[in-house]
Image: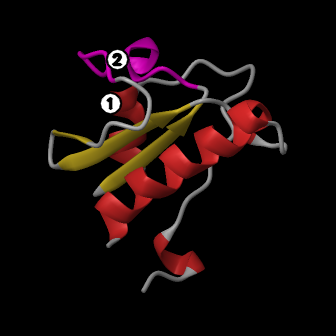
Amino acid sequence: KLSMDHIAILNTHGKQVTYPELKAQLPAKVALYFGVEPVSIGVPMRIPYFQVQPWDDCRFLYAPSLAEINGNSPAQVELKKQLWMALKKIFG
């Protein structure tokens, strides 16, 4: 039930960003981090992969980088399944 008007995709490769800066510019109800550990940008908690974590009026999901997930090896297929299950928890 979302359109591209509801989504912001940010590539932070090579840039130092912080959660407070992101929140000020792009207040979000859901934040998906692929390959960016939330604590590295100022989120004060460690979140295991694929655990939906509510905090600061937002639901966070931390996952391996897309490069790690992309592929058809058994391990990558398992990561995709775990990601799908977590996304279903968030979006229904």
Q: Look at the picture and state if 47 lies above or below 55.
A: above
Q: Quadrant of the N terminus?
A: bottom left
**Dot 2 crowding, Cα within 10 Å, few <14, some 14–19, many 20+:** few
46 magenta-colored? yes
Q: Nearer the viewer, residue 67 or 82?
A: 82
Q: Is residue 52 visible?
A: yes
Q: Secondary structure at mark 1?
A: helix
Name the N-terminal-most of marks 1 and 2. Answer: 1
Give the residue at mark 1. 20
Circle 1/circle 2 CB separation < 8 Å? yes
Residue at the spot 55% in from the left edge and 25% down from the top edge: 36
Residue at the spot 30% in from the left edge and 22% down from the top edge: 43
Q: Position of residue 6 (x, y in %)?
A: 46, 73
The picture quadrant where one finds residue 49 is top left
From the viewer's perspective, is 74 left or right of 44? Answer: right
Residue at the spot 70% in from the left edge and 45% down from the top edge: 77
From the viewer's perspective, is 80 left or right of 28? Answer: right
Q: Quadrant of the C terminus?
A: bottom left
From the viewer's perspective, is 27 left or right of 44? Answer: right
Q: Which residues are magenta?
A: 36-47
Give the residue at mark 2. 42
The picture quadrant where one finds residue 28 is bottom left
The residue at the far front in this view is 74
Determine which of the numbered discs, if any, sits on residue 30 in the image.
none
Q: Secondary structure at mark 2?
A: loop
